[in-house]
Image: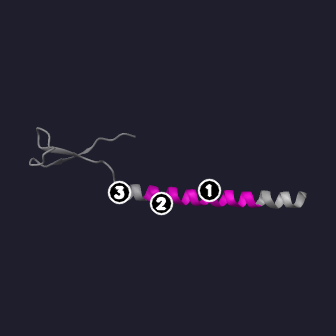
Amino acid sequence: MKTAFKRVLEPGHPEADADGYVAMPNVELPMEMMHMAAASRAYQANAAVLKRYQEMIDITLELLR
């Protein structure tokens, strides 16, 4: 979802527009950190499931020999 940049009034800033506003990034660090932590946990959980699955396959193959 695209959102507009935050506009901050800083008339002396070199990148200010004609009205004196500067376009600041619209990234919210706490939300990004929360999403990163959730993605990391999901990756760890998926990796654990795949490891267990591989162990089950190995045991099944051993039993069939």
Between 55 and 10, the one nearer to me in the picture: 55
Mark closer to the chain start, 2 or 3: 3
Q: Which mark is residue 46?
A: 1
Q: CA distance from mark 1 to mark 3?
A: 26 Å
Q: Position of residue 59 (x, y in %)?
A: 82, 61
Amino acid on which disc 1 is placed: Asn
Q: Position of residue 62 (x, y in %)?
A: 86, 61
Q: Position of residue 45 (x, y in %)?
A: 60, 60
Q: Which mark is residue 29?
A: 3
Q: Quadrant of residue 44?
A: bottom right
Q: Is residue 41 magenta?
A: yes
Q: Quadrant of the C terminus?
A: bottom right
The residue singled out by tag 2 in the image is 37
Q: Which mark is residue 62?
A: none
Mark closer to the chain start, 1 or 3: 3
The prevailing secondary structure element of the residues shown in magenta is helix
Say what secondary structure mark 3 lies in: helix
Q: Which residues are magenta?
A: 34-55
Amino acid on which disc 2 is placed: Ala
* Residue neighbourhood size for the residue with mark 1, other residues' Cα within 10 Å, grouped as few (<14), some (14–19), many (≥20): few
